[in-house]
Image (spheres, rainbow, N blue to C red):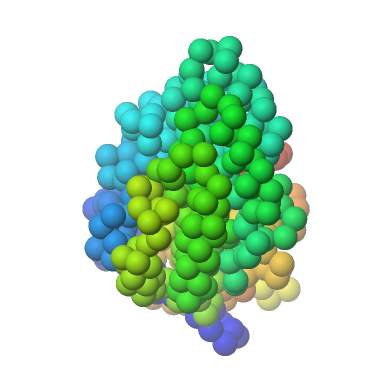
Amino acid sequence: MSGARFVHAPMTQFPVVDDCLQVGGVSLMQLAERVGRTPFYAYDRSLITQRVELLRQHLPAQVHLHYAIKANPMPAVVQHLAKLVDGLDIASGGELKVALASGMNPEAISFAGPGKTDKELTAAVAAGIVVNLESEREMDRIAVLGKRLGTRPRVAVRVNPDFELKSSGMKMGGGPKQFGIDAERVPAALAQIGELDFDFQGFHIFCGSQNLRAEAIIEAQAKTLELAVKLAKDAPSPVRLLNMGGGFGIPYFPGEMSFDIAAVGTSLGRLLNGIDPLLAQAQVVVELGRYLVGEAGIYVCRIIDRKISRGHVFLVTDGGLHHHLAASGNFGQVIRKNYPVAVGNKVVGREREIASVVGPLCTPLDLLADNMELAKADVGDLIVVFQSGAYGLTASPTAFLSHPAPAEVLV
């Protein structure tokens, strides 16, 4: 990026042939014709498979890998991953339907979230999945549902730990949080679980997301195991499940580097080799979403106007923040920074220029790239936003200004 001290990490996961990006072995221009319209999201199934293989290579063999559907709930993506991972994690009744339709064993599906409705809890209990209890009140509600349905709900306690994941993009634990039961209140909750007709599974301890510092993940995993051992002493039955969450990040912004999965895998292997007997029966789960699919996806929109305003080039496209809120900088960024962006059919280009990529919405917030160095682009060229496989379409306000929703394809 011109004028910046740092540059984006190289986006080398998608090959470039004749200066045109390739997705799943298909040129971007051909793919756009195949999809039939822009904008669209495209996900490369081979890249998703490779990411799972990378994790299998570096994580200890005894670790079970789960996919957090909230990162990308496209049914085709979930079905592809269901064949590769050991379980799925959901956060809504809608995601439960996608998870069950994927063919994943219901016993390997878990449900987290602080505001589960009775309808959602009923469906979850009836399906036989694990419900991560977020509060004592939710525990009471699910006990009533279990009696009504004549079944023993499979439950785990989601714990709000007394520590946080340092340097994480979003802190999910530590301090007051809407997520989980505070660690100091968990022993009392476990005693109550022992008096109810529950099938107790174990704990879900997740403290943060989007972290690129391996040392922070390593520290959090050590503290998670320490806390799980402490809580297991009050468990009503042996702990059979320990979901440690994930938090593995991907590089989005200038200056960020890829996550060191090898270092985390080595450390976790040492921790599990010396695991306390209280957790000897526990299936240890690492739950990942963004890290599995984020780098395998792109968002594609077409330039519909090129204009110059007081010497500045604006590339106006048919896509924008209503389709990709995160890339616009309006999904958690304090100071707006550019995602990696390129002209997909002119990745290098004969000429380069400084330009801003904007969408069709009547708001200055509709900005996909601000003062970026790009190939000189014309009307009809395709803009590509990388790192778009996670928290893209379903994390965006698609109804804003009533534009059509983008297409999605798994290639």
Q: Position of residue 291 (x, y in %)?
A: 43, 58
In percent of the image, x 47 and y 30: which residue is there? 199
Q: Nearer the viewer, residue 65 or 181?
A: 181
Q: Nearer the viewer, residue 383 or 169?
A: 169
Q: Position of residue 54 (x, y in %)?
A: 28, 62
In this rendering, position of residue 354 left or right of residue 97: right
**Which corner quadrant holds the C terminus?**
top left
Q: Nearer the viewer, residue 408 or 30?
A: 408
In this rendering, position of residue 394 left or right of residue 32: right
In this rendering, position of residue 1 left or right of residue 272: right
Quadrant assignment, res 262: bottom left
In percent of the image, x 41 and y 40: which residue is there? 88
Q: Relative to 251, is 321 above or below?
A: above
Question: Residue 50, can we see it?
Answer: no
Question: Residue 254, can we see it?
Answer: yes
In percent of the image, x 28 and y 55: which residue is there? 62
Q: Position of residue 82 (x, y in %)?
A: 32, 39
Q: Relative to 277, is 104 above or below?
A: above
Q: Position of residue 352 (x, y in %)?
A: 47, 77
Count of numbered tags: 0
**Which corner quadrant holds the N terminus?**
bottom right
Quadrant assignment, res 396: top right
In percent of the image, x 34 and y 32: which residue is there? 104
Q: Nearer the viewer, residue 241 or 406?
A: 241
